[in-house]
Amino acid sequence: MALAVASRYARALADLVLDPARGLPPERATVELAAFEQVAGSSVDLRNVLLSPAVSPARKRAVVARLAGQLEMSRLVRNFLYVIIDHRRTAMLTEIREAFQALIDERTGAAEADVKAARELAPAERESIALSLGRMTGKQVRCKFSVEESLIGGLLTRIGSTIYDGSVRGQLGALGRRLAE
């Protein structure tokens, strides 16, 4: 049920953001929602104000307006947050943002890749990996890089439910399974 509700709000926001007349790039809307979610999640007092039924919607709107000004948030995203407040869906902000990101990715032909490497990668290597993944998938790929030393060498990449294991650890494991047969 909650996922269906979050999807409905996400779909409404995606429809607005992808309307060319609005002039708001989808990437900016995504960043703004994530920034607001991060700020709201980083402060216990702010989270309590936004989630408490004892705090009036007008007071919550005032808090959001102030934060929106500090975060230089677009009018569209700010108004969307007001709608969430008015319909008492603030607790679902994470689910709404995730569903919104998935819809934007689907509609714009983008994907997010989680790339783990055995060592820190240079900017040129990161760019090359992103371009290669884009060619492989046919999508615009946003990469989130992290270091996992247990890979020994190479990369382990997840795009959606697909995993590409080019790590030394993975190759050694595959070799071990073949030898055991």
Image (cartoon, rainbow, N blue to C red):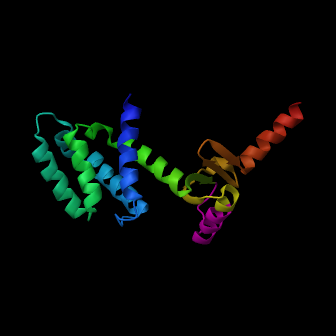
**Image x and y of residue 156, in percent:** 66, 50
Residue at figure coordinates x 25%, y 49% from the top left: 81
Quadrant assignment for the C terminus: top right
Q: Quadrant of residue 9?
A: top left
Give the magenta-colored segment's residue range.
118-132
Can residue 158 be seen?
yes
Q: Quadrant of residue 95?
A: top left
Residue at figure coordinates x 37%, y 31% from the top left: 2
Extreme residue in the bottom direction: 124
Residue at figure coordinates x 61%, y 58% from the top left: 139
Residue 52 among magenta residues: no
Can residue 44 be seen?
no
Which SS type dominates the magenta stretch? helix
**Image x and y of residue 164, in percent:** 69, 48
**How many numbered callouts?**
0
Extreme residue in the top direction: 1
Q: Using residue 125 as the reference point, say whether residue 85 is left or right of it.
A: left
Q: Using residue 5 as the reference point, say whether residue 140 is left or right of it.
A: right
Quadrant assignment for the N terminus: top left
46 lies above or below 2: below
**Image x and y of residue 162, in percent:** 65, 44
Residue at figure coordinates x 42%, y 58% from the top left: 18
Q: Nearer the viewer, residue 121 or 101?
A: 101
**Image x and y of residue 176, in percent:** 82, 37
Q: Nearer the viewer, residue 32 or 15?
A: 15
Residue 124 among magenta residues: yes
